[in-house]
Image (cartoon, helix red, strand yellow):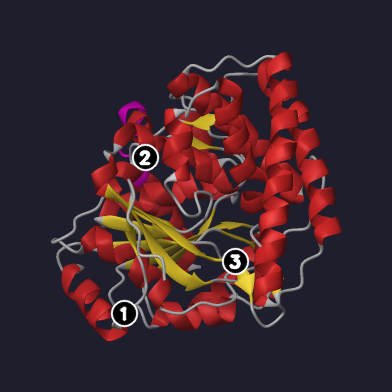
């Protein structure tokens, strides 16, 4: 087993005593309360993941609350989700993020100069939930609602290095093996086939190791949706309003937290709902496009790179070469482990990702400012009691 430590502290799982870890977290959260935020789409209630997630969360008696920011089309869907979680024993709030009460509050906020109505999707939903969670908790853990292999150790591991006073980290990023050993399939395609070779290509194109790229490369899985952070950080992060959420969060940690207060933790094997390849409007292609736009924006701000059509063309060529190298390596790894590896499908995916470098890159050059949601500190300065008003709205919605 690789126990190597690099710039970012890594908490490996090779001798974890689960009972001890849970007790340590339970003792620590008496003084440092914790919330879990789990964004979800209504469609996920029809999947196989939420039943086991609910059972796992019910074992996390150390949690102060669970906040579920929900994207639902109507009152019927919202009511269905509330009923589904009615047997959740931990105090919880279902936040109907596109419901009429929250929309009304955001309309009022617009008159104060903060327009949140132009943002839709996971980014805004997470932002709303962080506002409420940061009111009453010292730390917040966030994970997705489609985790198929879930137990109480996921939130426990995420929270442990944040609330344990002997460690006192500010940010913890979860990483895991994206392999389904039963089906013999290797997942994690956006990271394996897009982001990782893209970062290598960026370093080669610019002729040096870019500081933010070096930071991202310090993590085993920089675009995982599982992380934990202190509430003061949650109030001070700008969040992209699209699939660039995870890269955007990493950029905020890079700007605001020294590396010795950041760690990553092994969450073990992990399986969740797998996105279809899709196109420019949905699926993995849309995800890769949003990631690239967010990444370019951060690199211009932090590393002063110059983006042009010529830069994008060269980056695309270099990306394809590095991606081909990755495919060769993953093919060998899959062969060694007896996994099913469709090399042709992986090659096709790289070609589609490659096209997005030009499409998303040109779109970025047309609109370089982008769409980042203002942090909560700015929002509070515009309306002092906005988080309390938001909490009141959510409580009323949950009392029905």
Residue 127 visible in the current orientation: yes
Q: CA distance from mark 2 to mark 1?
A: 29 Å
Residue 387 rendering spot, x and y as whole percentages: 35, 44
Residue 384 visible in the current orientation: no
Residue 63 rendering spot, x and y as whole percentages: 31, 71
What residue would you read off at disc 1?
A: 15
Residue 339 drawn above or below residue 164: below
What residue would you read off at disc 3?
A: 178
What residue would you read off at disc 2?
A: 253
Element at label 1: loop
Residue 294 vs residue 168: left or right? Answer: right
Q: CA distance from mark 3 to mark 2?
A: 24 Å
Of the numbered discs 3 and 2, the one sitting upstream in the chain is: 3
* Quarter of the image that includes the N terminus: bottom left
Q: Residue 167 or 138: which is nearer the viewer? A: 167
Element at label 2: helix
Q: How many other residues sit within 10 Å of disc 2, few (<14), some (14-19) or many (≥20)? A: many
Element at label 3: loop
Residue 64 vs residue 296: left or right? Answer: left
The residue that appears at 66% across and 78% down in the rendered structure is 48
Q: How many other residues sit within 10 Å of disc 3, few (<14), some (14-19) or many (≥20)? A: some
């Amino acid at each position: 087993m690789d126990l190597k430590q690099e710039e970012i502290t890594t908490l490996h799982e090779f001798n974890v005593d689960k009972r001890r870890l849970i007790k340590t977290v339970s003792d620590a959260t008496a003084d440092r309360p914790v919330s879990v935020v789990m964004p979800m789409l209504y469609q996920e209630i029809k999947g196989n993941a939420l039943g086991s997630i609910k059972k796992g969360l019910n074992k996390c008696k150390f949690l102060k609350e669970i906040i579920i920011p929900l994207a639902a089309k109507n009152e019927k869907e919202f009511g269905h989700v509330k009923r589904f979680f009615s047997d959740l024993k931990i105090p919880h709030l279902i936040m109907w993020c596109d419901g009429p009460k929250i929309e009304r509050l955001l309309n009022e906020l617009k008159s104060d100069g903060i327009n949140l109505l132009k943002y839709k999707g996971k980014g805004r939903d997470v932002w709303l939930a962080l506002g409420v969670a940061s009111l009453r908790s010292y730390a917040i853990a966030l994970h997705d609602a489609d985790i198929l292999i879930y137990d109480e150790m996921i939130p426990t591991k995420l929270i442990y290095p944040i609330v344990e006073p002997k460690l006192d980290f500010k940010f913890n990023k979860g990483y895991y093996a994206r392999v389904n050993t039963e089906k013999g399939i290797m997942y994690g395609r956006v990271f394996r086939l897009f982001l990782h070779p893209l970062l290598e290509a960026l370093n080669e194109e610019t002729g040096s190791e870019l500081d933010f790229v070096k930071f991202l490369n310090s993590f085993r899985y920089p675009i995982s949706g599982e992380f934990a952070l202190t509430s003061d950080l949650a109030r001070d992060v700008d969040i992209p309003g699209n699939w660039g959420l995870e890269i955007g969060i990493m950029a905020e940690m890079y700007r605001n937290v020294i590396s010795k207060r950041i760690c990553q933790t092994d969450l073990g094997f992990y399986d969740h709902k797998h996105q279809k390849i899709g196109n420019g409007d949905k699926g993995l292609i849309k995800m890769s496009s949003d990631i690239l736009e967010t990444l370019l924006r951060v690199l211009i701000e932090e590393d002063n790179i110059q983006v042009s059509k010529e830069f994008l063309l060269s980056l695309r060529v270099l990306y394809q070469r590095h991606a081909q190298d990755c495919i060769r390596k993953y093919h060998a790894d899959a062969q060694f482990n007896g996994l099913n590896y469709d090399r042709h499908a992986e090659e096709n995916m790289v070609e589609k990702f490659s096209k997005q470098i030009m499409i998303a890159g040109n779109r970025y050059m047309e609109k370089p400012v982008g769409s980042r949601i203002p942090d909560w500190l700015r929002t509070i300065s515009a309306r002092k009691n906005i988080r309390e008003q938001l909490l009141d709205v959510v409580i009323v919605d949950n009392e029905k």
